[in-house]
Structures are given as C-alpha cells and as structure tokens.
Amino acid sequence: MTIITDPLFYALAIPAVVALGLSKGGFAGAGQMATPLLALAMPPLEAAAILLPIMMAQDAAALWVYRKDWSGTILTITLPGALLGVGAAWALAAHISDAAVRLLIGVTTIGFVLYYWIGPKRVAREAGQPGVTAGVLSGAMSGFTSTLCQAGGPPFQMYVLAQKLAKMNFVGTTAFFFATTNAFKVVPYFALGQFSIKGMGTSLVLLPLAMATNMLGFWLVRITPQELFYKITMALMFTISIELVRSGITDILRG
C-alpha cells in the first residue's frame, strides 16, 4: 500500500485526526483545526481530500449514535443551501491558487475563533429566531467553506443555536448536516483530481486513530463540560491560522 511517509505530515496529521474524532463525536468546533494543521505541510485541497474519507467513516458512526436526535425541519431548510455552496466552491477551487486557499482557511478559521470568543450563544440570542432564507444562506455558506477548507461549522452553528435546541438534538442535527454535506463533496474532489492512491492509503492508515477518538468524543460529550476543551482548541486554532495567513500572503506576494 502506497502512503505518505513524511514525518512532518504525521506530526501534524495525528493531532488533526484526534481533533476530527472528538469533533465528530460531538465536540463541535474541534475539527476546525484539522485542515489548517495539514495545510501547513501540503496543498489545502489535498489535505481536505485526505481527511474526507476519514470524516465520512466518522459520519457513519455519528449517524448511528445520534439517529434519534435530529431536527428534520432544520435539515430540510439548510441542506439545499449546502448543495449550492458545495457547487460554488467546486467552481471557484479550479481557478485559485493553493496560497489563496491557505489564506482563506486562515481568515475563515480566525473568524471562527473570534466568533467563539464573542460568544455564539450571545450572537444567536441577539439574532432572534431565523427564518427559511437565513437557513438556506447559512447552509450555502457552510457548504462553501466546508468544501474549500473543512470550515463549515460557524455559519451552520450560528443558525442552529438560534433554534435553542436541546444539547443532544443540536449535536445530532449537526452530525446529519455534515454527513450529507461531506457526501456532496465527493464528486467535486474527484473532478478536481484531489483523490490519489497515496492519499487514500494514508487515510486508511489514519482511520483507526480517527475512529478511536470518535468513540471517545461520543463518551466525552455526554459527561464532560466543554468550556476548557474549547478554550485550548481555540487558542491552537488561532495560532495555526495566523501562520496560514502569513504564509498565504507571503506566497501570493512572491507570485
């Protein structure tokens, strides 16, 4: 089996996959650091394509665990928008450089961190009860950023938090939304030539760790307060994103 052998890749991939596992287990937001981490060592879309098969396996586990905890109304509103967002990202990705995508990842993730620090509950409370148009737009923004840099959480979460769902219903609805959105992304990634034998082999090597941390996430989300975990995650994401913005701007200026 052909796999990536670069030690730097695995030094970044292991914490990235752990973060993904915890995120898919229910710690929404932790997975935001996965693609930014790998983007430090390879082209961002290639990094996203390596993570996608892992995420889809984790999605299957999450759908089973949260099979009774989800909102059909929210999914009916947001998923058509997500499909539009994935299509828009597909059209754009073929025309922008790796440096530009890296910059987008950095800026998007910094925005997510700032959104967290401002307080998502406060944002949701001030926004009021959003309607169908807001849901479609949130789904589109989430599908777009998820396709380019696996950073689709903030738009979707801001919309869903305003619905004041119970914790498990919020987690389950999020799981169903991103499982479907990730399935939408398979065709664009194939069309953009981001899947490779080496990448798929590497995904397979990382999968056991991903599933183990996924199970850990399912357990932790039920018993552990998330505040301290999020503070650590956000600090790491903010640091990584600053480096991505710096390297993206530097590469663009050199070009």
Image (tube, helix red, strand yellow):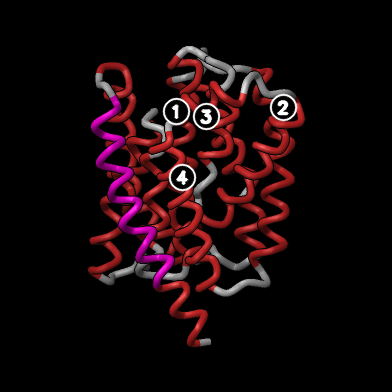
How many neighbours does mark 4 have within 10 angstroms: few (below 14), some (14-19), or many (20 or more)? Answer: many
Let me know if residue 229 is in the magenta part: yes
Let me know if residue 231 is in the magenta part: yes
Label 1 SS? helix
Q: Earlier in the sequence, mark 4 or mark 2?
A: 2
Q: Do the residues labelled 4 and 3 touch (CB within 8 Å)?
A: no
Q: Can you identify the residue that label 3 sits on?
A: 123
| Among the 4 quarters of the image, the one containing residue 81 | top right
Q: Residue 112 carries which label?
A: 4
Residue 144 located left or right of residue 64: right
Q: Earlier in the sequence, mark 1 or mark 4?
A: 1
Kind of residue at badge 4: Phe
Q: Which numbered disc, 2 or 3, marks the residue closer to the eye?
A: 3
Q: Can you identify the residue that label 2 sits on?
A: 77
How many neighbours does mark 3 have within 10 angstroms: few (below 14), some (14-19), or many (20 or more)? Answer: some
Q: Earlier in the sequence, mark 4 or mark 3?
A: 4
Q: Earlier in the sequence, mark 2 or mark 1?
A: 1
Bounds of the magenta span?
226-246
How many neighbours does mark 2 have within 10 angstroms: few (below 14), some (14-19), or many (20 or more)? Answer: some
Q: Earlier in the sequence, mark 1 or mark 3?
A: 1
Q: Which numbered disc, 2 or 1, marks the residue closer to the eye?
A: 2
Locate residue 32, reporting x and y percent.
42, 46
Q: Are marks 2 and 1 in contact (CB under 8 Å)?
A: no
Residue 68 located left or right of residue 18: right
CA gap, disc 4 to disc 3? 13 Å
Q: Can you identify the residue that label 1 sits on?
A: 62
The residue sitting at 54% across, 44% down in the picture is 152
The residue sitting at 71% across, 31% down in the picture is 134
Q: Are marks 2 and 3 in contact (CB under 8 Å)?
A: no
Locate residue 211, reporting x and y percent.
33, 38
